[in-house]
Amino acid sequence: MARVALTLGPLFFHWPAERLRNFYFRIADETSLERVHVGEVVCGKRMPFSDPVWPEIIERLERGGKEVVLSTLAAPATVRERKAIAELCADGRLVEINDITALPARSGRPFVTGPFLNVYNEATARFLARHGAATICPPVELSLDTVGTIAGACPEVGFELFAFGRLPLALSGRCYHARLHGLHKDSCQFTCEQDPDGLAVDTLDDQPFLAINGVQTLSAQIHSLLVEPAELAARNIRRLRLSPHGCDMVEVARTYRDLVEERQDPEGARFVLSCLELPGTLVDGYAHGLAGSQLAARA
């Protein structure tokens, strides 16, 4: 059975430069992740803060034996942002495409598709494969069985499942953080930095509902796909993606490594994760064809 590889996906949240540097240096030195994504995918206004730090981070990650993937914006809104995407697509490293308008700039060279692209069927996956998709990370609401069906039609592509973190659900033209603080999007004062894991939003009867992150909507809970490696191999799923959060991501990566190398069973891995300081409860409903806010182990 082929080994399941682990990927650290792009950071969704707005962290200060020093925190970014410390986080990724630790990922480089203390984890066995095969692949790490860097770059801004949520809000182009944040890029001037993080862009100066990425070269140093990339150098440290590559020195640590990680394959670096350059992630691109999921909803580019300006000429400057589209130009930045085109420049990334010209890089010799692997690039993650999160908006289909980036495809012409990258077509013919290997790329990764992020969960923001609408890959819901075999025809779309084959189309992307013809244009160079080497890895496809489907939308987060698809079940294991559905992804397995799509992956079976494209055996030449490595399919990757979003396996840990708040689920990326939607992007908006409006900034929720700015609105919350009585500000306009153009003068947001980067208030999203106040919530390094996103800001939880409850219903009127105080039930966990969603989380906001600037222009992004995420799940309030933490998705945690924990299944036996054989279940992944049977569906041609070759990678699991972990999404960066403020908890101990080195321990998260270690837990998933133990799982995919069969040193830990799913229930044991779930217990380890539940002991971490997570911003929400653990769920896995989408992967099992249930509501995303459910935990299949209790269904």
Image (spheres, rainbow, N blue to C red):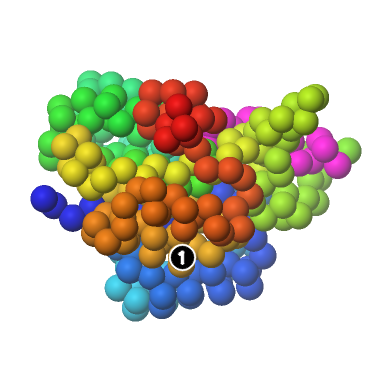
Question: Where on the picture, by quarter, is residue 181?
Answer: top right
Question: Residue at coordinates 66% horizontally, 43% vertically from top-left?
Answer: 213
Q: Is residue 118 visible?
A: no
Question: Residue at coordinates 71% horizontally, 30% vertically from top-left?
Answer: 207
17 up-or-down from 297: above or below: below
280 or 82, nearer to the observer: 280
Report the side of 49 relative to 127 (left or right): right
Q: Which residues are magenta?
A: 168-181
222 up-or-down from 292: above or below: below
Question: Residue at coordinates 23% horizontally, 41% vertically from top-left?
Answer: 232
Label 1, on which residue? 251
154 up-or-down from 243: above or below: above
- Name the spot of residue 277 as percent of width and height, x first: 61, 58
- Name the spot of residue 241 as percent of width and height, x first: 38, 49
96 or 104, nearer to the observer: 96
Q: Residue furthest right?
A: 182
- Name the spot of residue 209 as percent of width and height, x first: 66, 30
Report the side of 157 relative to 29 (left or right): left
- Name the spot of residue 12 as percent of width and height, x first: 56, 49
Label 1 SS? helix
